Image: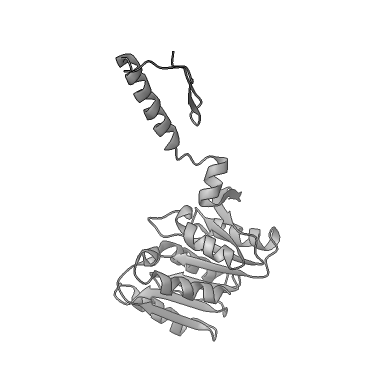
Amino acid sequence: MLAVASTCGIVEASSARVPWPMPRHLVLLVGAIVLLAGACGDDDSTGSASGAAVTGERIELDGSAALIWGDGERGAVLAHGASYDAASWQEQAEQTAAAGSTVVAVEDLGPDALRAASEFLETERLVTDVAVLGAGAGADAMLALLSEEPDLADQVILLSPNRVVEGLGSQPKLFIASEGESVADVSRQLAEEAPGKQNDVLLVEGSAHAQGLFDSDQATVVTDAILERLA
């Protein structure tokens, strides 16, 4: 007799002798065991343990979901683009955390969520300074908040912002965009007009927009520029 015990993660067959050639009903049963094992092995659930390992630790800030990586002395708040989510920052967040930062990626792009992330890093993680990094819609959300609260961040890094705002602070700023995208001039104008003496613009080849830069052939250039500024 062939006995099967399955807990979706463990599939066991007894070591009882199976006659050969194998009867048809046993062939079908063995096939079912293989399929069951494969289904269990392909489980990509984002439960508390495996999900945290893949996307960072899930936390809640002022009623909004966020992900957090690292425990460095510096802090970084990441705001995603319109067609992305907090988990889309995984690779960049891991690199930033490895370079010495505690990184929070927000799910909600509203001002309350962005403010809560910054305050969490300062009051709960006691970081020495907070950098904000936004892409596309996330960059616009950061700009809107910073125009009202210019001292919210110690450093600003924005990818492909879509509009120019006034009222920014004098902290260092880096605006990154592709030369061929339609909003490239926004980054140029922000770098020229924003207060402060450390406002830089990086225009890279191509036409990739916002977080799409990390999927382009300019990904290394953009990542290195960000990590250098954060350091």
Occupied quadrant, residue 121? bottom right
Residue 215 image offset from top left, x and y in percent: 36, 63
Occupied quadrant, residue 190? bottom left
Please name the colour scheme applied to the rendered image: one colour
Looking at this view, name the residue that lies furthest to the bottom: 197
The tally of labels here is 0
Residue 166 image offset from top left, x and y in percent: 48, 76
Residue drawn where x is 41% and y is 55% of the image: 84
Vertical relation: 78 (above or below) 37: below
Residue drawn where x is 40% and y is 65% of the image: 214
One can see residue 91 in this view: yes
One can see residue 168 in this view: no
Q: Is residue 105 left or right of residue 211?
A: right
8 or 60: which is nearer to us?
8
Vertical relation: 205 (above or below) 82: below
Quadrant housing the N terminus: top left
Residue 159 image offset from top left, x and y in percent: 42, 70
Residue 56 image offset from top left, x and y in percent: 55, 52
Residue drawn where x is 53% and y is 69% of the image: 146
Q: Is residue 111 left or right of residue 163?
A: right
125 or 197: which is nearer to us?
125
Quadrant housing the C terminus: bottom right
Occupied quadrant, residue 221? bottom left
Looking at this view, name the residue that lies furthest to the top: 1
165 or 30: which is nearer to us?
30
Vertical relation: 75 (above or below) 17: below
Residue drawn where x is 67% and y is 66% of the image: 127
